[in-house]
Amino acid sequence: MTYLEPKDRDDLAAGYAKVVLNARSETAARRVFAEQVGVAEALDFAGVQLRCDGSVVERWPVVSGDDPDLSDFRRAVALISHRATAHHEGLHWSLTEAVKAGRLPQLLRSVDAAYHVVIEHFGANGEVIDEQIRQFTTAEATDSFEVYNRYAAQAIMALRIEDRAALNEVIAAVNHDAAGPRFVGAVCDLYAGLLPEIATAEWQDFLSAWTARIAGLEDQFD
């Protein structure tokens, strides 16, 4: 069994240490796993895994359906950075990787969640930004760019209240050809237009450090 605990609980940015616990039997392993999951949230663990012969048998937090995992958040943070700096090659790479992995729905969720982390970290007014996004949901669209901005806003609002029916309706509308990556890119376009400060050195440094930490966690749990 393995788990990742913070090196410094007063500074989670310091990263995580991987702890490996071996058990002599499956019963003992499952008992220890349950004990660690029981304290994981309180102790700020990044994750807990029950393993057998190198394969993951159970994990915490539980990932199912369209819930993002570490790889989705890594792509999302990189995508946010690339969009803010107009790094088109990076944008293409992040979206293409998600398509090949079959993870576009998860990337959509992680992009929205990652933007909220950034908004909270830098003290931007999340309520004002949400209201601006809400206005886009019914805005008139005169070209395809504005159409996708409207779809993006509708998806973000659906995610905000966990309205899966509304989210599925938006996804169905863009579920053709290369529309999926463009749709996720539109979510980034919308946020980037409302948060131009993401392109500044301070915000970019935060995103770079965050991407590196996520990649490090992936390596530790690989």
Image: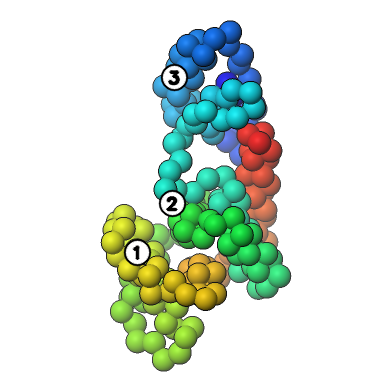
Q: Which element type, helix, strand or loop, lies under badge 1?
A: helix
Res 89 → quadrant: bottom right
Judge the density around disc 3: few (<14), some (14-19), many (≥20) Cα neighbours within 10 Å: some
Camera sees residue 208: yes
Q: Name the mark nearer the viewer: 3 or 1.
A: 1
Res 130 → quadrant: bottom left
Q: In this view, does 109 lie to the left or right of 200?
A: left
| Above or below, comparing residue 222 to residue 81 in the picture | above
The three-letter code of the residue at mark 3 reads Ala
- Which mark is first along the chain, 1 or 3? 3
Q: Position of residue 101 (x, y in %)?
A: 59, 55
Residue holding disc 2:
66
Q: Position of residue 3 (x, y in %)?
A: 57, 26
Residue holding disc 1:
168
Residue sticking out furthest to the right? 89
Camera sees residue 193: no
Residue at horizontal 53%, vertical 56%?
103
Residue holding disc 3:
34
- Which mark is first along the chain, 3 or 2? 3
Q: How far apart are marks 3 and 1 (CA)?
A: 35 Å
Pick the front one: 25 or 160: 25
Are the residues flagged by discs 2 and 3 in contact, CB closer than 8 Å?
no
Res 216 → quadrant: top right
Residue sticking out furthest to the bottom? 142
Residue at horizontal 63%, vertical 23%?
53
Q: How far apart are marks 1 and 2 (CA)?
A: 12 Å
Q: Position of residue 86 (x, y in %)?
A: 65, 73
